[in-house]
Image: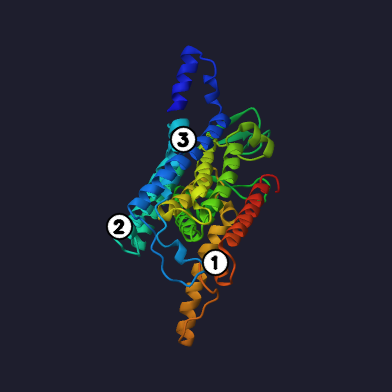
Amino acid sequence: MLYYLFRYLHEHFHLAGTGVFQYTTFRAGLAIVISLLIAQIFGHRLIKVLQRKQIGESVRDLGLQGQNEKKGTPTMGGLIIILAILVPVILLCRLRNIYIILMIMSTVWLGLIGFLDDYIKVFRKNKEGLSGRFKVLGQVGLGITVGWVLFYSNEITVREYLLPNGTYSAVDASKIFKDVHLMITTVPFMKNNELNYGDLFATAGTFFNGLYGFLYIPIVIFLITAISNGANLTDGLDGLAAGTSAIIGITLAIFAFVSGNALLADYLDVMFIPDSGELVIFCTAFVGACIGFLWYNSYPAQVFMGDTGSLTLGGIITVLALVVRKELLIPILCGVFIIENLSVVVQVSWFKYTKRKYGEGRRLLRMSPLHHHYQKLGYHESKIVSRFWIVGIMLAVITLVTLKLR
């Protein structure tokens, strides 16, 4: 909204200073400031409302240190994150941009699923919340929608440059280029590192040439479901999910800035994605929302994000990675979420296997997800969170290194 207003004032009245809104970097910086302010102002008021209405977390007795102290802490704080993301994005972004539309839709979609889950837990006093099948169904629905748009929309393009031998490349810049709808992604740690999803069916015959969407869309569904659930499982200690998400958000902002800038994309030899630079503003708003939420969510937490926040964070991160063509980096970048997810899968699978084989279930970890295992070992909550953040930073650095290390 403000973007269009100031562009109109600049073009028609030439008011001094209005042209600065045309710069992505200025709007990105302003987005993080607005996001932080909203999290601070709205967050404090929301916590008071939640406390007044006694919307608190019910805690199962798991024998964890400091667990009883969390009982009654307000939940549904993810509303702070969602508002702190959406307001600056709506104010500062070009809202006709297909990538921004996708990100707003994903934020609202998963926010509603998480809110419904929290609502059932808090107001209906049902500790199970929304049924797992309905939660997964909502995630699958978003995956189908995002995958379909990315695969079939002609507004989703990459730039191809004409090489001296007459062929086109997504990374070797020249003065002759064309923007094409092409489903390619970046393969990390490799030169000429573009993978065309269509090539995966190339050896199967011409009949399959138009069917590789049936491969791509399930990949999108799997990633959105896995990472959003991973973020949900990670949200078990004060500040863990929000801090980890902020680290990932900064990394994705750098990728969006590089991919959306023709000069930087040329210099770093990565594919240029037209119009994707607008995602930098979304990323900075996302980072600002996570950091602003940490003001209240760091140990000892004054509010929990609940599924309203955790499912939304994981979904946003996945869709951002998909639109900047970095989905193959998700196993590294989102390593904390993935290991939390795997710790639950392995624990449950091993328990069922040993119960079937030996008549009693056995555990590999003292408790899952992984952060609870370290609590059982006697580590303080804040130390676990700090070390997980450090691991997240290390994984983010490794991810960024792929820009040059090939």
Alpha carbons under labels 1 and 3: distance apart:
35 Å
Q: Position of residue 162 (x, y in %)?
A: 63, 33
Element under disc 3: helix
Give the color scheme: rainbow, by chain, secondary structure or one colour.
Answer: rainbow
Image side of residue 351 versus residue 393, left or right: left
Of the image marks 1 and 3, the number of the one nearer the N terminus: 3
Give the residue at x 53% y 35%: 33
Q: Position of residue 126 (x, y in %)?
A: 31, 63
Q: Determine which of the numbered discs, if any, sits on residue 88 in the image.
A: 3
In the rendered view, tell whether residue 211 sits above or below residue 28: below
Can residue 154 be seen here? no
**Image quarter for residue 174?**
top right
Of the image marks 2 and 3, the number of the one nearer the N terminus: 3
Q: Quadrant of the N terminus?
A: top left
Classed neighbour count for the residue bearing mark 3: other residues with Cα under 10 Å, few (<14), some (14–19), many (≥20): many
Q: Position of residue 356 (x, y in %)?
A: 45, 83
- Asked if the residue under mark 3 is in contact with the one under mark 1, i.e. CB atoms within 8 Å, the reply is no
Q: Amino acid at mark 2?
A: Phe
In front: 369, or 11?
A: 369
- Asked if the residue under mark 1 is in contact with the one under mark 2, i.e. CB atoms within 8 Å, the reply is no
Alpha carbons under labels 2 and 3: distance apart:
30 Å
Of the image marks 2 and 1, the number of the one nearer the N terminus: 2
Residue depth check, mark 2 versus mark 3: number of the one nearer the observer: 2
Element under disc 2: loop
Q: Amino acid at mark 3?
A: Pro
Residue depth check, mark 2 versus mark 1: number of the one nearer the observer: 2
Residue labelled with disc 2: 123
Residue labelled with disc 1: 370
Q: Amino acid at mark 1?
A: Leu
Instruction: State the residue lying farthest toward the left.
Output: 124
Q: Position of residue 253 (x, y in %)?
A: 57, 41
